[in-house]
Amino acid sequence: MTSEGWGTPPVEPISQHYIVCGGNALAHRLVLELVEHYEVPVVVLVADRTRDHAPQIEQLSGVAAVVEYTSVTEEALRAVSIGTARGLALVEGSDQENIHAALSAQNHNPDIRIVFRMFNQRLGENIERLLRNGAALSGSATAAPAFASAALGRPNSVEIEGRYLHIAFDDDITSDRICVVADQIDRQDLGRIRLLPEQQGDSAEFVRLAAEFGDQGPIRPGGVRPEPAPAADPEPSAGPMPPAGPVPSPGPAREGEPGGRAALQVLRIEPREPIDWMRRLRWRLLDTMRFFTSARMRLVLLTALAAVLLAFGVLWYLNRNFGWTVYIALLDLAGAAQPDQLSDVAAGTGAGTGGFWQRVAQVVITICGITFAPVATAIAVEVLGSGRRGQPRNPGAGTRDHVIVVGLGNVGTRVATQLHTMGVPVVCMERDPQARGIAAVRALGIPVVMGDGPFEQQLRRARLKHSRALVAVSGDDATNLEAALEARHGNPEVRVVVRLFEDDFASHFYKTLDNAASRSVSYLAAPAFAAALMGREVRGTLSVLRHVLLIAELTVEDGSGLIGLNRHDLEDPGGVRVIAVRFAHGGQLQWNFPDRTRRLAPGDQIVVAATRSGLARLNTVAVEEQG
């Protein structure tokens, strides 16, 4: 059964185009990537041309056509000329729908490149094996590390063969950095930032000469060192090292300079969140109070416990035998002790050796035991019943120093899971009882505040006063902003991280709030989807405020346009930096390989830090046939 299509298919026959299925934010960003940076024809298949981001997509120049079908059916695929397309991106719909559409597309065009969004990454890896030329990506998995790291006040990292690349700002930049990735950083005006600025400083003149003369360039007698530029920013790791002299660190921005700086650095181990075991133990012990559902019940139980301890002390004082005291106290607590008979007391043969006060203590313990038994039974029944009903637990009274995650969609679930894995206490908030992430976080024992009440009330239940950060990652910008502002009102010291699609919202957000960060899921994920659609592997994305730096790995294949190029040809200011090279016969990845004139051969691999446009240029070069 097919769905009726209301869109107008391309009037003229189209081929060698790319198809994007979806009208959400990720589809919008992906289409922008393809038409602006890769300059390829794009046909978009949407469910409704009047909803979500479809109207904005239709206004983009470079979009060949927007076709409307309620689902990705055989008829819809034929309408967008699937048989002559070069690539297909499925970025909307459920995992099951995307799998079905990917397999159908391969039947129509066995050579087409298919990239599909999958929340279940393990299932996606298995489906990749069924496709000739396909890749399964998760937008939430790509973006979640940036949100989690922002909540903890540190940049996220990308792992490359045991080394973790991350972005450091200003005072955190060290002399062994890989390269400067941004300058002129102004948090009040994010448009001024320059990504991968032109390398300058002590090595700039040497790099210029090497680029000009290459292998045949002249050698200056005596190794004369040129004078450095007065306001230069050194970047020793991007080119050959100077013949002498220490390597200066760029340091923080100085007065009169255009702004701060950011650099790419390597850590030997992934940075972990330092949480001492005593704090974790205290948090766990206090959190057990969640079982006591009311203040009145806690008062009763604490009073009974105090009475038992006092009676136990009396028994121990009267008998001077700790083991016997524990034995008789436990029997009394369970109601199984044998009382003294009046005839035994009169004859002086009673079991008790403490007289009247021992009997009083035993009666107290027995009565308190009667109190404990039904309460313990009620708690056990409630816990088991809540688990069977699938209800998440509320945050306990001992919850401290935690991160509040607002919204349990795909991204929120990933963020909460990652923070929990790192050992950071997490509390989630969700208004939709059917949200897919509730079951996932409940299985991890993460407390969830449910309900659609005012944010102020919900945040109070999430123990905002004792939290370290709030991450608002629902699908609505206004809701995320409201949660952040309410959180800052309730706790002026809390760090807020907000998911925002609109850049205008983000600019006002940075200008208004300090100790805050903004991220866009689609902005982080779209470059990876676009690169995968072109057959390239993006190992990860790093955030430079609202900008994205891509870490990609490219393999030089037979017939590739990369053959014969060197670092001079590959690198360009504002676009690409080569940070590591693995030669076909070397086997080991070499970081900051100093020979900028060595040409690439088939089998070589390069790791680059690139902007979106820079990676698009590299992909264009890589697919060109030589000759």
Image (tube, grey):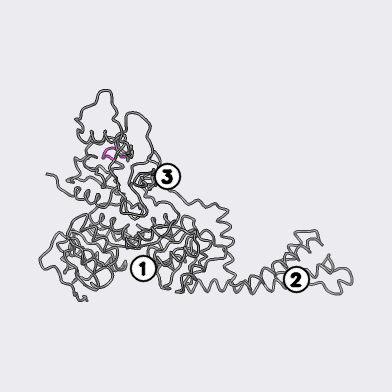
In contact (CB < 8 Å): disc 3 and disc 1: no
Q: Nearer the viewer, residue 279 or 389?
A: 279
| First along the sequence among labels 1 and 2 | 2
- The location of residue 340, given as percent across then percent down, is 82, 72
Quote the CA–CA distance across marks 1 and 2: 58 Å
Task: State the residue position of label 3.
Answer: 172
Task: State the residue position of label 1.
Answer: 476
| First along the sequence among labels 2 and 3 | 3
Question: The C terminus lies in which quarter of the figure?
Answer: top left
Callout 3 crowding tier (Cα within 10 Å): few <14, some 14–19, many ≥20: few
The part of the chain drawn in magenta is 581-588
Q: Nearer the viewer, residue 425 or 478?
A: 478
- The location of residue 357, given as percent across then percent down, is 82, 68
Task: State the residue position of label 2.
Answer: 364
Magenta-drawn stretch contains 80: no
Residue closest to the far left: 12
| First along the sequence among labels 3 and 1 | 3
